[in-house]
Amino acid sequence: MSGCSKTCKLGFVKCAQTVFKLITGTLSKDIAWWYYQYHRDKIEDELEMTMVCHRPEGLEQLEAQTNFTKRELQVLYRGFKNECPSGVVNEETFKQIYAQFFPHGDASMYAHYLFHAFDTTQTGSVKFEDFVTALSILLRGTVHEKLRWTFNLYDINKDGYINKEEMMDIVKAIYDMMGKYTYPVLKEDTPRQHVDVFFQKMDKNKDGIVTLDEFLESCQEDDNIMRSLQLFQNVM
């Protein structure tokens, strides 16, 4: 696998790790820190050593729309094309990427939810522009941008609210994906307990749903979540 291809795949996985930290706070600190330490030097080396062979059309526009430099976009694009020569990622490829990085768990459901968060136009495929836009927000966006993107992920039916079952579906999918890295130190009902605590905290008016404003307010009141927003800020 080429350096660019690895960088592209790591980009997808960093999205998963960042969202995982956003909702679980310090619970996943050791997992996230291991990931950061293991991949940081590798990513830096790849960015320095990779010879860029293709410059995507509209690069200047993407540079203006995201928080990536021209060189970072070139590296990401080459990796994207290596993995997906057609220029788009379908859901099956998305699941295969996550399965490679989380071999001890079942990443299929989380990959499904994350894919639909990337696929903002609901076309059934993710273009390079979709990929780098989401990655830019999650790694280098403002606090509000990151939280709005995460809210959209949890709002599975896209009705503008998060209910408890939607939050449970996402959190359960995350624990399933982490597999043995999580379950030996957690009880079976931990995902449900975690969701109960978070939902009670976020549902300010106790109407059974969490609005975007409630989500933003609750997350910004939580020191663990605010610290987690910064963890992967400058990994790439």
Image (cartoon, helix red, strand yellow):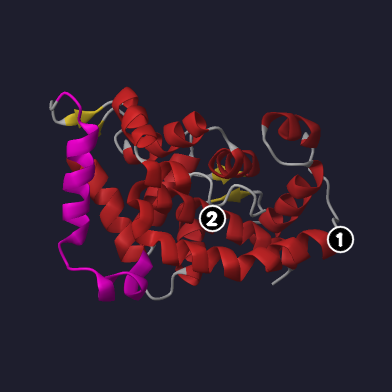
> What kind of element bears circle 1?
loop
Query: Magenta span covers which residues?
Result: 178-205
Q: Nearer the viewer, residue 3 or 224?
A: 224
x and y percent of residue 67 in the render?
68, 37
Q: Quadrant of the N terminus?
A: bottom right
Could you tell me residue 3's position as x and y percent? 73, 66
Mark 2 element type: helix
Across and down, in percent, residue 123 comes to 49, 37
Give me the disc on residue 51.
Answer: 1
Q: Is residue 236 above or below residue 182?
A: above
**In the image, is 191 to the left or to the right of 113?**
left
Judge whether 140 appears above or below 171 on screen: above
Q: Looking at the picture, tell me which residue is in the foreground, 7 or 45.
A: 45
Q: Say if 134 sits above or below 104 in the image.
A: above
Of the image marks 2 and 1, the number of the one nearer the N terminus: 2
Whether 185 is drawn above or below 50: the answer is: below
Residue 187 lies in the magenta-colored region = yes
Task: Give the amino acid at mark 1.
Answer: Met
